[in-house]
Image (tube, rainbow, N blue to C red):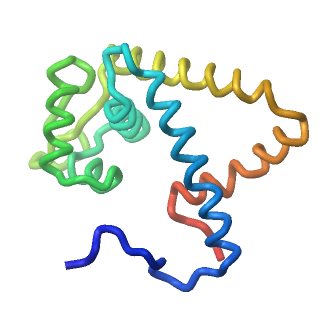
């Protein structure tokens, strides 16, 4: 059985890449923590916002694909979607994507409204933080958007 946490990277990594990873990791975790906290006191948890966001980007997605994208088991994802469905934030329908055996999931209008509110809150907070930066720092962040996007998509070209 593979170890959950390996002290060594799976591929050969340069010292420069490891140093940059060591700088980025705590910063990204800290930023993600702040963004997750912005939904506290609302009807949604940070995890629910992420699941709603995934579903809204790909209406008709199934449980297995959602679970795979989030890195959790299908039964865990099914439980999370059950809670969203009970709250009226998502709806399931059989065979929307053409396979009648499959159950597809879509965000309801109420789910869309809450997701939009969560996104607006997070975006406003982040924009406020960006006001503290110099024009040079803002340009550096703007230049980093594409590479960071590639990291999240797992498609960084070498």
| Quadrant of the drawing holding the N terminus | bottom left
Q: Nearer the viewer, residue 106 or 46?
A: 46
Image coordinates for residue 18, horizontal then vertical, percent: 62, 72
**Above-or-below relation of 39 to 155:** above
Residue 111 left/right relative to 103: right
Q: Residue at x 70, y 26 (%)?
A: 129
Which residue sits at x=51%, y=31%? 35
Quadrant holding the C terminus: bottom right
Percent from the top left, x then y, of residue 76? 16, 45
Residue 151 coordinates in the image, percent (x, y): 57, 59
Tell me the quarter of the picture where residue 17 sits.
bottom right
Q: Quadrant for residue 150, please give it.
A: bottom right
Residue 79 against residue 73 in the figure, above or below? above
| Residue 13 image-quadrant placement | bottom right
Would you say 154 lies left or right of 134 here? left
Identify whether 103 is placed above or below 111: below
The residue closer to the viewer here, 2 or 82, is 2
93 relative position to 146: left or right: left
Name the residue: 33% across, 22% down. 44
* For residue 145, side relative to residue 136 (left or right): left
Locate residue 104, reporting x and y percent.
21, 40
Residue for point 57% across, 38% down: 31
All told, the count of numbered labels is: 0
Q: Nearer the viewer, residue 88 or 27?
A: 27
Q: Residue furthest left?
A: 101
């Amino acid at each position: 059985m593979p170890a959950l946490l390996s002290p060594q990277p799976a591929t050969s990594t340069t010292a420069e890449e490891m140093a940059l990873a060591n700088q980025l990791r705590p910063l990204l975790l800290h930023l993600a923590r702040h963004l997750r906290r912005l939904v506290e006191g609302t009807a949604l948890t940070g995890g629910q916002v992420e699941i709603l966001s995934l579903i809204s980007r790909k209406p008709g997605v199934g449980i297995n694909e959602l679970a795979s994208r989030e890195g959790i088991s299908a039964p865990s994802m099914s439980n999370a979607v059950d809670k969203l469905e009970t709250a009226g934030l998502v709806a399931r329908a059989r065979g929307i994507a053409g396979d009648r055996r499959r159950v597809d999931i879509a965000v309801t209008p109420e789910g869309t409204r809450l997701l939009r509110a969560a996104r607006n809150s997070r975006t406003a907070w982040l924009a406020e933080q960006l006001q503290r930066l110099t024009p040079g720092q803002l340009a550096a962040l703007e230049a980093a958007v594409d590479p960071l996007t590639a990291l999240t998509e797992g498609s960084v070209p070498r």
